[in-house]
Image (spheres, rainbow, N blue to C red):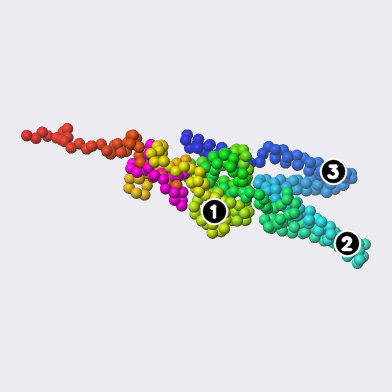
Amino acid sequence: MQDSQSNAARTSTKDEVSHSDPPFLLTAVRILYLGLMIAAASVPITNSKPGGNPLIDFVMPIAATLAVVAIVVLLDIRTPHKRISNVVGIYLAVVAGLFASLAVGVLIDLIAGAWELTEDEAALKYLTLLKLAVGLTLCYVAVSVVLSTRDSIRLVIPYVEFSRQVRGVRPMLLDTSSLIDGRLNTFTKTGFLDAPLIVPQFVVAELHTLADSNDRLKRDRGRRGMANLRGLQNTSGITLDIEHIETPPAMEVDSMLIDLAAEKNLRIVTTDANLARVAEIRDVATLNLHDLGDVLRDPAVPGERLHLLITRAGEAAGQGVGYLPDGTMVVVENADQRIGDEIEVVITNAVQTSAGRLVFANVSPDQPEGLARAATAQPGHRGRGPNAPEQD
């Protein structure tokens, strides 16, 4: 029962973040396209002369039309996530190829006219075939060049550029750790953040993987990251884009983030100290949420009480470890026997490290003992057993 509820929760979270195409509308458009193509194929059938060849007059137009429809619809289904840059690039490439074909066709006609080849019927057929082959080749070469160099091409018209040029405030690139942290959600609601936010699709995929993990801590972190991402999407006053970026399948997420930030001149928002160090080596700007938290958050006050779930044992003997909602580690003394229990602790100290904030605490004196410690702490019986013989 619990597994089915968790699976349903993960499925609903994925459906909220992912942007799927409307299937009913696409199906209606495809059916309309099929009907219009069949109507177009009936034009030569209605204009055919009586007594003609049925194979040429009836079968061939319908078969050719259905073949074209099948190829076009299959290509449309096989590419569900289309990018406007690719569509515009292919269109402009085909237009450029057609203009080049027209120019080459005029040149071929001039050469054929100079050699008086236009009067020969066989030569005219070969000239027509030559112009058709050259036109198709030029269109193919134009499309191939545009698709292979679309990240390097800058068009003059800004609305059809292949790669976004950074203007004004530099956008912020969010990584997985910043989405799991969640403090950025609170900061965006204050109105101080006016920079666009970008979340690559491979970061969303990593959150999905964490949400589907069998490990409890990873699963909770993944779900919290998905919920925070959804909250950013619903926050008014900010611009959040989920970018579908083509990346190598075997490449690490951190490497893809750094490459994307270096290519697009973006700033990486993270809480991962190792990622920040590697980005610094690559001269990529990073914004660590721990640094922002140190400036805006008051230091932990000794004596503050809070409820904490002890998840594992600490490095030193007798220590237990728990985590605050923002991921801050809390080391609790004398809590090694309380793993799996939610207890009340009292903060004693807080230390800022390169990896983030570290809080120390003690178990509250008013906290009742756990069942495990209570069972092991019972005093042993030192007298005679009930069946022991009496001594004289």
Between 305 and 48, which is closer to the camera in this rendering? 305
| Residue shown at 41% from the left, 41% from the top | 301
State the separation of the CA atoms marked 3 and 1.
Answer: 58 Å
Badge 1: few (under 14), some or many (20 or more) residues near its Cα, within 10 Å?
some
Identify which amino acid the numbered label 2 is placed on: Asp
Q: Judging from the image, what secondary structure is the residue with disc 1 in?
A: helix
The picture places residue 240, in percent across and down from the top left corner, at 62, 43
Identify which amino acid the numbered label 1 is placed on: Asp
| Residue shown at 41% from the left, 45% from the top | 350
Q: Judging from the image, what secondary structure is the residue with disc 2 in?
A: helix
- Which tag is nearer the camera, tag 3 or tag 1? 1
Task: Give the magenta part as a residue range.
Answer: 327-356
The residue wearing badge 3 is 43
Q: Which mark is residue 254?
A: 1
Nearest to N terminus: mark 2 or mark 3: 3
The picture places residue 177, in percent across and down from the top left corner, at 51, 47
- Quadrant in which the C terminus is drawn: top left
Horizontal arrangement in the rendering, residue 367 relative to residue 267 (left or right): left
Which picture quadrant has residue 40? top right
Does any portion of residue 210 appear in the rendered image?
Answer: no
Image marks 2 and 1: residues in contact by CB distance under 8 Å: no
State the separation of the CA atoms marked 2 and 3.
Answer: 31 Å
Identify which amino acid the numbered label 3 is placed on: Val
